[in-house]
Amino acid sequence: MSASAIYLAGATASGKSALALCLAKRLGGEIISVDSMQVYRGLDIGTAKPSAAEQSEVRHHLIDVAGLDEPFDAAQFVRLAKRAEAAVQSRDARPIFCGGTGLYFRALFDGLGESPPGDESLRSVLEAAPFDELLDELKAKDPAAFESLDRKNRRRVVRAVEVIRLTGQPYSSQRTGWGAPGQAPSNLFCITREPDDLAKRIHARVDSMFERGLVAETEHLAKRGLRENRTACQALGYRQVLEHLDGEFGLAETIELVKARTRQFAKRQRTWFRNQMECQPFECAAGELADGCCERLLGMLG
């Protein structure tokens, strides 16, 4: 009988990947990434993608499965994730889902939503409209979506207004077709940290990314079509570095901006996981090594 899957969710920089790697080594597992940006080839430094050494130690799935010229969405994720899970179990290994993209987790657990497909003509009109007007329309027609969306992400705002105009209904009430969180699968954990500890980890991670060449990586990706991929170009870090390359911000200001945006993103992730999925909270203490977290978590597994 195949061992049940383990699910590790949580905010960026909370230590999910290190914990998943430790669990995989202890349990003979393979890791299935639940990250909407690690799917793209070339987005390495800015997505904190597992290193080549880590991927050689433990088999990873759903990393580098799409090019910058390809769209990728929750439907593709669910299809590939289920295929990967079956393959892992066929090898008598344990699937370990790990990531911070809440929408992908929820789609995996509760199915895909029923929001309408895009309308190219309407999309063109909306993309040409002043962004402030789109925000005003979203706020007036769907205050809940206005509050929950990343209002600096034009792509998401455009999609919300598009769905509202196509259906005449609030985006927030139909974008997934989900009601209250359903029955959570066993072994679903949300990795948490104290806010100050998480902020320190975010700052250290961002500094490391720039030291390792995030600007050069982004410049290279821009030549390969990063700007034309409406999803990938919005990725944290890359979006701000593209603005830096366009002369909008100096390097020091860009680094601080990435830190601030990442803290804000982590806060939204924590709220999403708390409200949208019935996870078992699993707190990692400041300074606690992955091995120690792993040992504690092993005692909680079903």
Image (cartoon, rainbow, N blue to C red):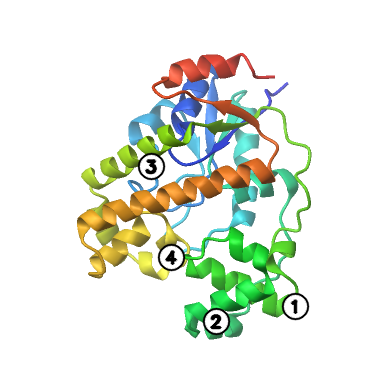
Q: Is disc 4 in contact with disc 1, using a CB cutoff of under 8 Å?
A: no
Q: Residue 175, located in which quarter of the rendered image?
A: bottom right
- Observer-nearest residue: 167 or 223? 167
Q: Amino acid at mark 1?
A: Gly
Q: CA distance from mark 3 to mark 4?
A: 21 Å
Q: Given the image, on which type of amino acid does mark 4 rest?
A: Asp
Q: Which residue is mark 1?
A: 168
* Cα–Cα span, label 1 and label 2: 16 Å
- Nearer the camera: disc 1 or disc 3: 1
Write down the quadrant of residue 29 in the picture. Answer: top right
| Residue marked by disc 4 | 69
Q: Quadrant of residue 201?
A: top left
Q: Earlier in the sequence, mark 1 or mark 3?
A: 3
Which of the two labelled residues, at mark 3 and mark 2, occupies the earlier sequence position? 3
Total tally of numbered discs in the picture:
4
Q: Amino acid at mark 3?
A: Ala
Q: Regarding mark 3 in the picture, which secondary structure is present there?
A: loop
In 3D space, how far apart are the residues under numbered discs 4 and 1 (Cα atoms)? 32 Å
The residue labelled by disc 2 is: 126
Which quadrant would the C terminus be assigned to in this image? top right
Tell me if I can see residue 114 in this picture. Answer: no
User: Which label lies toward us, 4 or 1?
Assistant: 1
Q: Of the two numbered discs 4 and 1 on the same chain, state the one appearing first in sequence.
A: 4
Image coords of residue 298 (percent x, y) = 58, 16
Instruction: Using residue 112 as the reference point, say whether residue 68 is left or right of it.
Output: left
State the mark number for residue 48: 3
What's the CA distance linking mark 4 and mark 2? 22 Å
- Rendered location of residue 121, percent (x, y): 59, 85
